[in-house]
Amino acid sequence: MRKAFGIRSSIIGLLLLCLVCAGCGVSSLPSEGNAHSEPAGEKEQGATDEIIGRDSGSALDDKAPGSGAQIVEGSGELEPIDADAQGSADTKDEQEASEKKSIFDVFTGSSDEKKEQAAPAGDGSKKVQKKITAMASDYAYYYDRLDEKGQTLYREIYAGLSSMGTAYLSFLDEELTDEVYEYVKADHPELFYCRGYRITWKESFSKITDVELWGDFSMSEEQVLEYADRIEKRTNEILAYVPATGDYEKIRYLHDYIVKHTDYTIDTEENQNIISVLLTGKSVCSGYTKTLQYLLGKAGVEAAYVWGNARGAQGGSELHSWNLVRADGEWYYVDATFDDPTVTGTGEDKSTLQYTYFCVTSEELGRTHEAIHTEYLPNCTATADNYFVKEGRMLESYDPVRLQVIFDGAGAAGAESVTFRCKNAAVYREVKQKLIDEREMFNYLGGRDKVGYQANDAMYIFVFWL
Protein backbone atom coordinates (compact mmCIF):
# COMPACT_ATOMS: atom_id res chain seq x y z
CA MET A 1 0.00 0.00 0.00
CA ARG A 2 1.09 3.57 -0.64
CA LYS A 3 0.20 6.62 1.36
CA ALA A 4 -1.01 9.57 -0.68
CA PHE A 5 -1.59 13.12 0.36
CA GLY A 6 -3.73 15.44 -1.77
CA ILE A 7 -4.52 19.07 -1.47
CA ARG A 8 -7.35 20.75 -3.26
CA SER A 9 -8.41 24.33 -3.47
CA SER A 10 -11.94 25.44 -4.14
CA ILE A 11 -13.21 28.96 -3.78
CA ILE A 12 -16.71 29.96 -4.76
CA GLY A 13 -17.69 33.63 -5.14
CA LEU A 14 -20.77 34.29 -2.98
CA LEU A 15 -22.91 37.11 -3.85
CA LEU A 16 -24.44 36.93 -0.91
CA LEU A 17 -22.51 40.52 -3.39
CA CYS A 18 -23.83 43.80 -3.61
CA LEU A 19 -22.59 39.97 -5.56
CA VAL A 20 -23.20 42.38 -7.64
CA CYS A 21 -23.09 44.43 -2.39
CA ALA A 22 -20.83 43.82 -0.65
CA GLY A 23 -21.87 42.03 -2.21
CA CYS A 24 -23.35 40.82 -3.71
CA GLY A 25 -23.70 36.92 -4.59
CA VAL A 26 -22.44 33.52 -5.33
CA SER A 27 -21.04 31.90 -8.40
CA SER A 28 -19.78 28.40 -8.70
CA LEU A 29 -16.75 27.22 -10.63
CA PRO A 30 -15.28 23.74 -11.01
CA SER A 31 -12.83 22.66 -8.34
CA GLU A 32 -9.24 22.14 -9.33
CA GLY A 33 -7.84 18.68 -9.51
CA ASN A 34 -5.39 17.28 -6.96
CA ALA A 35 -2.33 19.41 -6.80
CA HIS A 36 -0.26 16.35 -6.02
CA SER A 37 -1.11 12.78 -6.95
CA GLU A 38 0.62 9.42 -6.97
CA PRO A 39 -0.07 6.20 -8.84
CA ALA A 40 -3.32 4.49 -7.97
CA GLY A 41 -3.18 2.46 -4.81
CA GLU A 42 -4.97 1.93 -1.51
CA LYS A 43 -4.49 4.50 1.20
CA GLU A 44 -3.69 3.48 4.72
CA GLN A 45 -5.93 4.46 7.61
CA GLY A 46 -4.62 7.84 8.65
CA ALA A 47 -3.74 9.11 5.20
CA THR A 48 -5.44 12.47 4.80
CA ASP A 49 -6.84 14.49 1.93
CA GLU A 50 -7.50 18.16 2.44
CA ILE A 51 -9.50 20.99 0.90
CA ILE A 52 -8.75 24.56 1.85
CA GLY A 53 -11.12 27.33 0.86
CA ARG A 54 -11.37 31.05 1.42
CA ASP A 55 -14.34 33.36 1.18
CA SER A 56 -13.66 35.75 -1.65
CA GLY A 57 -16.49 38.00 -0.56
CA SER A 58 -18.59 40.01 -2.93
CA ALA A 59 -17.86 40.12 -6.57
CA LEU A 60 -18.71 43.78 -6.55
CA ASP A 61 -16.32 45.61 -4.35
CA ASP A 62 -13.24 46.70 -6.24
CA LYS A 63 -14.72 49.04 -8.81
CA ALA A 64 -16.62 52.29 -8.54
CA PRO A 65 -20.35 52.30 -9.32
CA GLY A 66 -21.54 53.27 -12.77
CA SER A 67 -21.77 56.98 -13.34
CA GLY A 68 -25.44 56.78 -14.22
CA ALA A 69 -27.31 60.00 -14.80
CA GLN A 70 -26.36 63.56 -14.01
CA ILE A 71 -28.63 66.58 -14.04
CA VAL A 72 -27.60 69.10 -16.67
CA GLU A 73 -29.10 72.57 -16.47
CA GLY A 74 -29.77 74.74 -19.49
CA SER A 75 -31.98 77.47 -20.77
CA GLY A 76 -35.25 76.73 -22.51
CA GLU A 77 -34.34 73.15 -23.39
CA LEU A 78 -34.93 69.60 -22.27
CA GLU A 79 -31.65 68.00 -21.35
CA PRO A 80 -31.24 64.23 -21.42
CA ILE A 81 -29.46 62.47 -18.56
CA ASP A 82 -27.99 59.18 -19.77
CA ALA A 83 -31.33 58.34 -21.27
CA ASP A 84 -31.26 54.55 -21.05
CA ALA A 85 -28.96 53.94 -18.12
CA GLN A 86 -30.30 52.58 -14.88
CA GLY A 87 -26.93 52.63 -13.23
CA SER A 88 -25.06 49.69 -11.89
CA ALA A 89 -23.71 49.79 -8.42
CA ASP A 90 -21.42 46.95 -8.31
CA THR A 91 -17.99 45.68 -8.90
CA LYS A 92 -15.84 42.66 -9.50
CA ASP A 93 -14.59 40.11 -7.07
CA GLU A 94 -11.97 41.03 -4.47
CA GLN A 95 -10.05 38.04 -5.61
CA GLU A 96 -9.47 36.71 -9.07
CA ALA A 97 -12.07 34.44 -10.60
CA SER A 98 -9.74 31.48 -10.30
CA GLU A 99 -9.87 31.81 -6.50
CA LYS A 100 -13.35 30.43 -6.10
CA LYS A 101 -14.94 30.72 -2.69
CA SER A 102 -16.52 28.08 -0.60
CA ILE A 103 -16.67 28.30 3.16
CA PHE A 104 -18.24 25.80 5.43
CA ASP A 105 -17.98 23.84 8.67
CA VAL A 106 -20.23 20.87 9.03
CA PHE A 107 -21.68 19.17 12.09
CA THR A 108 -23.73 16.02 11.91
CA GLY A 109 -27.37 16.93 12.37
CA SER A 110 -30.72 15.24 12.66
CA SER A 111 -32.90 14.81 9.59
CA ASP A 112 -36.04 13.98 11.55
CA GLU A 113 -37.56 17.44 11.53
CA LYS A 114 -37.47 20.25 9.02
CA LYS A 115 -34.80 22.85 9.81
CA GLU A 116 -34.01 21.18 13.13
CA GLN A 117 -30.66 22.45 14.39
CA ALA A 118 -28.35 19.81 15.77
CA ALA A 119 -26.07 20.37 18.73
CA PRO A 120 -22.43 20.78 17.71
CA ALA A 121 -20.56 17.52 17.38
CA GLY A 122 -17.18 19.14 17.92
CA ASP A 123 -15.65 21.98 19.87
CA GLY A 124 -18.05 24.72 18.80
CA SER A 125 -19.35 27.36 21.17
CA LYS A 126 -22.83 26.65 22.47
CA LYS A 127 -23.05 30.27 23.60
CA VAL A 128 -22.43 31.54 20.09
CA GLN A 129 -24.78 29.01 18.56
CA LYS A 130 -27.59 29.98 20.94
CA LYS A 131 -27.10 33.65 20.10
CA ILE A 132 -26.83 33.23 16.34
CA THR A 133 -29.71 30.79 15.93
CA ALA A 134 -31.90 33.16 17.97
CA MET A 135 -31.15 35.85 15.35
CA ALA A 136 -32.17 33.59 12.47
CA SER A 137 -35.37 34.22 10.54
CA ASP A 138 -38.19 31.70 10.46
CA TYR A 139 -37.81 31.68 6.68
CA ALA A 140 -35.27 29.51 4.84
CA TYR A 141 -36.12 29.81 1.16
CA TYR A 142 -33.46 27.54 -0.32
CA TYR A 143 -33.69 24.90 2.41
CA ASP A 144 -37.35 24.37 1.59
CA ARG A 145 -36.45 23.58 -2.01
CA LEU A 146 -33.71 20.99 -1.42
CA ASP A 147 -34.26 17.23 -1.41
CA GLU A 148 -33.78 15.15 1.75
CA LYS A 149 -30.05 14.65 1.21
CA GLY A 150 -29.51 18.33 0.56
CA GLN A 151 -31.53 19.30 3.62
CA THR A 152 -29.48 16.93 5.81
CA LEU A 153 -26.26 18.51 4.61
CA TYR A 154 -27.78 21.99 4.98
CA ARG A 155 -28.59 21.36 8.67
CA GLU A 156 -25.10 20.04 9.30
CA ILE A 157 -23.46 23.04 7.64
CA TYR A 158 -25.61 25.54 9.51
CA ALA A 159 -24.98 23.83 12.84
CA GLY A 160 -21.24 24.19 12.28
CA LEU A 161 -21.30 27.77 11.04
CA SER A 162 -23.60 28.93 13.80
CA SER A 163 -21.42 27.47 16.55
CA MET A 164 -17.98 28.43 15.16
CA GLY A 165 -16.82 24.88 15.74
CA THR A 166 -15.14 21.85 14.22
CA ALA A 167 -17.11 18.70 13.51
CA TYR A 168 -17.61 15.65 11.35
CA LEU A 169 -19.55 15.61 8.11
CA SER A 170 -21.85 12.62 7.65
CA PHE A 171 -20.72 12.12 4.04
CA LEU A 172 -18.28 13.61 1.56
CA ASP A 173 -19.75 15.12 -1.60
CA GLU A 174 -17.68 18.12 -2.63
CA GLU A 175 -19.99 19.38 -5.39
CA LEU A 176 -23.16 19.10 -3.32
CA THR A 177 -21.45 20.62 -0.29
CA ASP A 178 -20.34 23.63 -2.32
CA GLU A 179 -23.86 24.12 -3.64
CA VAL A 180 -25.64 23.66 -0.32
CA TYR A 181 -23.15 25.92 1.44
CA GLU A 182 -24.17 28.71 -0.94
CA TYR A 183 -27.79 28.18 0.06
CA VAL A 184 -26.99 28.19 3.77
CA LYS A 185 -25.19 31.50 3.46
CA ALA A 186 -27.98 32.87 1.24
CA ASP A 187 -30.65 31.94 3.79
CA HIS A 188 -28.77 33.16 6.85
CA PRO A 189 -27.49 36.76 6.83
CA GLU A 190 -26.86 36.40 10.57
CA LEU A 191 -23.72 34.38 9.69
CA PHE A 192 -21.82 37.65 9.28
CA TYR A 193 -18.48 36.31 10.54
CA CYS A 194 -17.96 33.36 8.15
CA ARG A 195 -14.91 33.64 5.94
CA GLY A 196 -13.42 30.30 4.95
CA TYR A 197 -13.03 26.61 5.63
CA ARG A 198 -10.76 23.61 5.73
CA ILE A 199 -11.96 20.06 5.20
CA THR A 200 -9.91 16.93 5.75
CA TRP A 201 -10.85 13.28 5.43
CA LYS A 202 -9.20 9.92 5.69
CA GLU A 203 -9.37 7.16 3.13
CA SER A 204 -8.70 3.54 3.97
CA PHE A 205 -9.03 0.79 1.40
CA SER A 206 -11.00 3.15 -0.89
CA LYS A 207 -13.41 4.04 1.88
CA ILE A 208 -13.83 7.65 3.06
CA THR A 209 -13.75 8.01 6.82
CA ASP A 210 -13.52 10.78 9.41
CA VAL A 211 -14.52 13.84 7.40
CA GLU A 212 -13.50 16.77 9.58
CA LEU A 213 -14.20 20.43 8.98
CA TRP A 214 -12.69 23.56 10.51
CA GLY A 215 -14.20 26.95 10.01
CA ASP A 216 -12.27 30.05 9.08
CA PHE A 217 -13.97 33.00 10.77
CA SER A 218 -13.21 36.69 10.55
CA MET A 219 -13.48 37.38 14.28
CA SER A 220 -13.25 35.80 17.71
CA GLU A 221 -16.12 34.35 19.72
CA GLU A 222 -16.16 37.46 21.92
CA GLN A 223 -16.33 39.76 18.89
CA VAL A 224 -19.15 37.74 17.33
CA LEU A 225 -21.20 38.02 20.52
CA GLU A 226 -20.48 41.74 20.78
CA TYR A 227 -21.48 42.41 17.16
CA ALA A 228 -24.56 40.23 17.53
CA ASP A 229 -25.72 42.32 20.51
CA ARG A 230 -25.18 45.55 18.60
CA ILE A 231 -26.98 44.21 15.53
CA GLU A 232 -29.96 43.12 17.61
CA LYS A 233 -30.16 46.49 19.33
CA ARG A 234 -30.08 48.40 16.04
CA THR A 235 -32.58 46.01 14.46
CA ASN A 236 -35.06 46.57 17.30
CA GLU A 237 -34.70 50.33 16.89
CA ILE A 238 -35.51 50.10 13.18
CA LEU A 239 -38.37 47.64 13.56
CA ALA A 240 -40.05 49.89 16.12
CA TYR A 241 -41.07 52.16 13.22
CA VAL A 242 -42.06 49.53 10.67
CA PRO A 243 -45.73 49.96 9.67
CA ALA A 244 -48.04 47.36 11.13
CA THR A 245 -50.29 47.44 8.07
CA GLY A 246 -49.45 45.24 5.07
CA ASP A 247 -46.48 43.62 3.35
CA TYR A 248 -46.17 46.40 0.78
CA GLU A 249 -45.82 49.06 3.49
CA LYS A 250 -43.27 47.00 5.42
CA ILE A 251 -41.14 46.31 2.35
CA ARG A 252 -41.25 49.94 1.25
CA TYR A 253 -40.34 51.27 4.68
CA LEU A 254 -37.31 48.98 5.03
CA HIS A 255 -36.28 49.48 1.39
CA ASP A 256 -36.35 53.26 1.92
CA TYR A 257 -34.56 53.04 5.26
CA ILE A 258 -31.65 51.10 3.81
CA VAL A 259 -31.29 53.40 0.79
CA LYS A 260 -31.46 56.57 2.86
CA HIS A 261 -29.06 55.38 5.55
CA THR A 262 -26.46 53.58 3.43
CA ASP A 263 -23.67 55.01 1.27
CA TYR A 264 -22.37 52.76 -1.46
CA THR A 265 -18.71 52.48 -0.43
CA ILE A 266 -16.41 49.92 -1.97
CA ASP A 267 -13.50 49.95 0.45
CA THR A 268 -15.41 49.92 3.74
CA GLU A 269 -14.87 47.05 6.17
CA GLU A 270 -17.43 44.25 6.50
CA ASN A 271 -19.11 45.39 3.29
CA GLN A 272 -20.27 41.87 2.46
CA ASN A 273 -22.56 41.51 5.45
CA ILE A 274 -25.21 43.14 7.63
CA ILE A 275 -22.67 44.83 9.90
CA SER A 276 -21.85 47.31 7.14
CA VAL A 277 -25.39 48.64 6.70
CA LEU A 278 -26.72 48.36 10.23
CA LEU A 279 -23.66 49.58 12.14
CA THR A 280 -21.60 51.70 9.75
CA GLY A 281 -23.98 52.84 7.02
CA LYS A 282 -21.44 51.99 4.31
CA SER A 283 -21.71 48.94 2.08
CA VAL A 284 -22.00 47.40 -1.37
CA CYS A 285 -24.73 45.30 -2.95
CA SER A 286 -24.32 42.24 -0.75
CA GLY A 287 -24.73 44.41 2.32
CA TYR A 288 -27.85 46.09 0.92
CA THR A 289 -29.37 42.74 -0.07
CA LYS A 290 -28.57 40.80 3.09
CA THR A 291 -29.76 43.60 5.34
CA LEU A 292 -33.09 43.97 3.56
CA GLN A 293 -33.54 40.20 3.75
CA TYR A 294 -32.64 40.16 7.45
CA LEU A 295 -34.92 43.05 8.43
CA LEU A 296 -37.84 41.77 6.36
CA GLY A 297 -37.55 38.37 8.00
CA LYS A 298 -37.71 40.03 11.41
CA ALA A 299 -40.75 42.02 10.27
CA GLY A 300 -42.56 38.85 9.20
CA VAL A 301 -42.05 39.15 5.45
CA GLU A 302 -40.40 36.26 3.61
CA ALA A 303 -37.38 37.34 1.59
CA ALA A 304 -34.51 35.55 -0.12
CA TYR A 305 -31.05 36.48 -1.34
CA VAL A 306 -30.60 36.16 -5.12
CA TRP A 307 -27.32 36.50 -6.97
CA GLY A 308 -26.26 36.66 -10.59
CA ASN A 309 -25.36 39.33 -13.11
CA ALA A 310 -26.77 42.74 -13.93
CA ARG A 311 -26.21 45.27 -16.67
CA GLY A 312 -24.19 48.23 -15.47
CA ALA A 313 -24.36 51.91 -16.38
CA GLN A 314 -21.74 51.39 -19.06
CA GLY A 315 -23.63 48.47 -20.60
CA GLY A 316 -21.37 45.68 -19.34
CA SER A 317 -22.52 42.75 -17.22
CA GLU A 318 -21.36 42.66 -13.61
CA LEU A 319 -21.90 40.36 -10.65
CA HIS A 320 -24.73 41.56 -8.47
CA SER A 321 -27.28 40.56 -5.81
CA TRP A 322 -30.89 41.48 -5.11
CA ASN A 323 -33.90 40.19 -3.18
CA LEU A 324 -36.87 37.96 -3.84
CA VAL A 325 -39.76 39.00 -1.58
CA ARG A 326 -43.22 37.67 -0.87
CA ALA A 327 -45.89 40.36 -0.57
CA ASP A 328 -49.53 39.55 0.03
CA GLY A 329 -48.99 35.98 -1.08
CA GLU A 330 -47.17 36.80 -4.35
CA TRP A 331 -43.48 36.78 -5.24
CA TYR A 332 -41.67 39.90 -6.52
CA TYR A 333 -38.09 41.10 -6.99
CA VAL A 334 -36.58 44.11 -5.22
CA ASP A 335 -33.17 45.67 -5.87
CA ALA A 336 -32.44 48.26 -3.18
CA THR A 337 -28.92 48.89 -4.48
CA PHE A 338 -30.12 49.95 -7.92
CA ASP A 339 -32.79 52.13 -6.32
CA ASP A 340 -30.19 54.18 -4.45
CA PRO A 341 -29.92 57.50 -6.35
CA THR A 342 -26.29 57.99 -5.36
CA VAL A 343 -25.51 54.61 -6.91
CA THR A 344 -27.48 55.01 -10.12
CA GLY A 345 -26.51 58.63 -10.59
CA THR A 346 -30.13 59.84 -10.61
CA GLY A 347 -29.48 62.25 -7.76
CA GLU A 348 -27.12 63.26 -4.98
CA ASP A 349 -29.86 63.52 -2.37
CA LYS A 350 -31.35 60.39 -0.81
CA SER A 351 -34.76 62.08 -0.89
CA THR A 352 -34.79 61.37 -4.62
CA LEU A 353 -34.55 57.61 -4.14
CA GLN A 354 -36.05 55.59 -6.95
CA TYR A 355 -38.42 52.61 -7.16
CA THR A 356 -37.31 51.23 -10.50
CA TYR A 357 -36.81 47.76 -9.03
CA PHE A 358 -39.45 47.77 -6.31
CA CYS A 359 -41.61 44.63 -6.53
CA VAL A 360 -41.04 43.91 -10.22
CA THR A 361 -41.86 40.79 -12.20
CA SER A 362 -39.42 38.23 -13.57
CA GLU A 363 -39.88 39.65 -17.06
CA GLU A 364 -39.18 43.20 -15.91
CA LEU A 365 -36.15 42.20 -13.86
CA GLY A 366 -34.87 40.05 -16.72
CA ARG A 367 -34.35 43.09 -18.91
CA THR A 368 -31.27 43.98 -16.88
CA HIS A 369 -30.65 41.11 -14.41
CA GLU A 370 -29.85 37.43 -14.83
CA ALA A 371 -29.91 35.13 -11.81
CA ILE A 372 -27.79 32.09 -11.02
CA HIS A 373 -29.57 28.93 -9.80
CA THR A 374 -32.82 29.84 -11.54
CA GLU A 375 -34.13 26.32 -10.92
CA TYR A 376 -35.18 27.43 -7.44
CA LEU A 377 -36.63 30.81 -8.39
CA PRO A 378 -40.33 31.38 -9.16
CA ASN A 379 -41.71 33.05 -12.24
CA CYS A 380 -42.93 36.30 -10.71
CA THR A 381 -45.94 37.65 -12.61
CA ALA A 382 -47.94 39.63 -10.03
CA THR A 383 -48.06 43.43 -10.34
CA ALA A 384 -50.44 44.56 -7.59
CA ASP A 385 -47.63 45.52 -5.18
CA ASN A 386 -45.38 47.13 -7.75
CA TYR A 387 -44.59 50.68 -6.62
CA PHE A 388 -45.93 52.40 -9.75
CA VAL A 389 -49.13 50.35 -9.75
CA LYS A 390 -49.72 50.82 -6.03
CA GLU A 391 -49.04 54.56 -6.09
CA GLY A 392 -51.04 55.29 -9.25
CA ARG A 393 -48.01 56.20 -11.37
CA MET A 394 -48.39 53.61 -14.11
CA LEU A 395 -49.47 55.07 -17.46
CA GLU A 396 -51.67 52.86 -19.61
CA SER A 397 -51.42 55.38 -22.47
CA TYR A 398 -50.35 58.97 -23.07
CA ASP A 399 -52.87 60.62 -20.75
CA PRO A 400 -52.43 64.40 -20.21
CA VAL A 401 -54.99 64.48 -17.41
CA ARG A 402 -53.29 61.65 -15.52
CA LEU A 403 -49.88 63.22 -16.04
CA GLN A 404 -51.06 66.55 -14.64
CA VAL A 405 -52.38 64.78 -11.54
CA ILE A 406 -49.01 63.05 -11.07
CA PHE A 407 -47.04 66.29 -11.41
CA ASP A 408 -49.40 68.30 -9.23
CA GLY A 409 -49.24 65.65 -6.54
CA ALA A 410 -45.45 65.63 -6.52
CA GLY A 411 -45.35 69.43 -6.35
CA ALA A 412 -47.86 69.57 -3.50
CA ALA A 413 -45.79 67.05 -1.55
CA GLY A 414 -42.66 69.17 -1.97
CA ALA A 415 -40.87 66.41 -3.89
CA GLU A 416 -37.64 67.22 -5.69
CA SER A 417 -38.51 64.91 -8.54
CA VAL A 418 -41.44 63.10 -10.09
CA THR A 419 -41.23 59.62 -11.51
CA PHE A 420 -43.73 57.50 -13.42
CA ARG A 421 -43.69 54.39 -15.54
CA CYS A 422 -45.30 53.28 -18.79
CA LYS A 423 -47.11 49.96 -19.04
CA ASN A 424 -45.20 48.72 -22.06
CA ALA A 425 -42.71 49.70 -24.75
CA ALA A 426 -45.36 51.12 -27.09
CA VAL A 427 -46.74 53.46 -24.44
CA TYR A 428 -43.21 54.44 -23.43
CA ARG A 429 -42.33 55.42 -27.00
CA GLU A 430 -45.52 57.46 -27.33
CA VAL A 431 -44.95 59.29 -24.05
CA LYS A 432 -41.33 59.95 -24.93
CA GLN A 433 -42.33 61.33 -28.32
CA LYS A 434 -44.88 63.69 -26.78
CA LEU A 435 -42.97 64.85 -23.70
CA ILE A 436 -39.44 65.01 -25.07
CA ASP A 437 -39.49 65.28 -28.84
CA GLU A 438 -42.58 67.49 -29.05
CA ARG A 439 -41.67 69.33 -25.82
CA GLU A 440 -45.07 68.89 -24.20
CA MET A 441 -43.23 68.32 -20.94
CA PHE A 442 -43.40 72.05 -20.26
CA ASN A 443 -47.20 71.94 -20.24
CA TYR A 444 -47.03 70.30 -16.81
CA LEU A 445 -44.43 72.57 -15.21
CA GLY A 446 -46.29 75.81 -14.68
CA GLY A 447 -44.23 78.09 -16.91
CA ARG A 448 -40.75 76.66 -16.29
CA ASP A 449 -38.46 76.74 -19.29
CA LYS A 450 -35.86 74.17 -18.28
CA VAL A 451 -35.88 70.78 -16.63
CA GLY A 452 -33.53 67.87 -16.04
CA TYR A 453 -34.81 64.40 -16.77
CA GLN A 454 -33.90 60.75 -17.13
CA ALA A 455 -35.59 58.32 -19.52
CA ASN A 456 -34.97 54.65 -18.74
CA ASP A 457 -35.47 52.75 -21.99
CA ALA A 458 -35.08 49.34 -20.32
CA MET A 459 -37.70 49.81 -17.59
CA TYR A 460 -39.98 52.37 -19.35
CA ILE A 461 -39.54 54.93 -16.57
CA PHE A 462 -39.23 58.72 -16.62
CA VAL A 463 -37.77 60.90 -13.87
CA PHE A 464 -38.14 64.69 -14.01
CA TRP A 465 -36.53 67.02 -11.48
CA LEU A 466 -38.88 69.74 -10.30
Image (cartoon, rainbow, N blue to C red):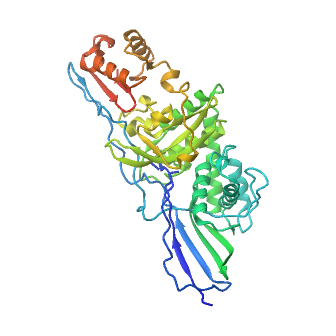
Question: Is residue 21 found left or right of 144 in the rendered image?
Answer: left
Q: Which residue sits furthest bottom? A: 1
The residue furthest left is 75
Q: Residue at x 53, y 76 (%)?
A: 7
Q: Position of residue 81 (x, y in %)?
A: 29, 31
Q: Say whether residue 189 is visible.
A: no
Q: Is residue 228 visible?
A: yes
| Outermost residue toward the top in this view | 401
Q: Quadrant of the C terminus?
A: top left
- Give the vertical position of 127 relative to 347 (above or below): below
Residue that sits furthest to the front in the current view: 40
- Please tell me whether residue 364 is drawn above or below residue 411 in the rendered image: below
Q: Position of residue 53 (x, y in %)?
A: 53, 67
| Residue nearest the viewer, comparing 240 with 166 | 166
Q: Quadrant of residue 419?
A: top left
| Image quarter hosting the N terminus | bottom right
Q: Residue at 50%, 58% (x, y): give it.
A: 28
The total of numbered circles placed on residues is 0
81 lies left or right of 153: left
